[in-house]
Image: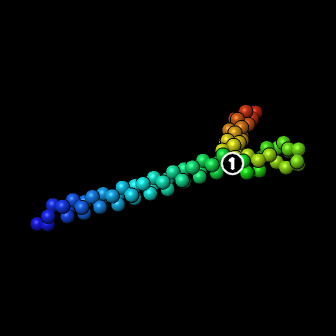
């Protein structure tokens, strides 16, 4: 049998590398989440609104506002179809 100190060292080294991988994965996940949050809140996409700003361009919106606007149009179209006078 190998001495006890060698097996303890091997196990602790293995545990350290496992802990390092968990830290690396958590850092990568944190960077991805922060990147997605920042990308979805930055106003860079030309908006679908009808109004034109003073500079003559469409106002910039963020990704969340574009999705909410699309969802609003989707719900409005259902309301329009359901309120038609045809049976």
What residue lies at 14% left-to-right and 64% top-to-bottom? 3
65 or 19, nearer to the observer: 19
The image quarter in which residue 32 lies? bottom right
The image quarter in which residue 17 lies? bottom left
Q: Is 62 left, or right, of 8 in this rendering?
A: right
**How far across and how far down the image is residue 54, in percent?**
88, 44
What residue lies at 79% left-to-right and 43% top-to-bottom? 49
What residue lies at 69% left-to-right and 43% top-to-bottom? 65
Extreme bottom residue here? Answer: 2
58 or 29, nearer to the observer: 29
**How far across and how far down the image is residue 22, in percent?**
40, 55
What residue lies at 54% left-to-right and 53% top-to-bottom? 31
**How far across and how far down the image is residue 87, in percent?**
71, 35
Q: Which residue is mark 1?
A: 42
Please give the count of numbered marks on the rendered protein: 1
31 or 45, nearer to the observer: 31
Residue 70 shows up from this direction: no
**How far across and how far down the image is residue 48, in percent?**
77, 47
């Amino acid at each position: 049998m190998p001495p006890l100190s060698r097996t303890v060292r091997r196990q602790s080294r293995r545990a350290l590398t496992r802990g390092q991988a968990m830290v690396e994965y958590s850092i990568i996940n944190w960077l991805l989440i922060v990147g997605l949050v920042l990308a979805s809140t930055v106003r860079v996409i030309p908006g679908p609104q009808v109004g034109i700003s003073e500079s003559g361009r469409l106002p910039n919106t963020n990704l969340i506002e574009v999705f909410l606007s699309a969802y609003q149009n989707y719900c409005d179209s259902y309301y329009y179809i359901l309120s038609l006078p045809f049976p």
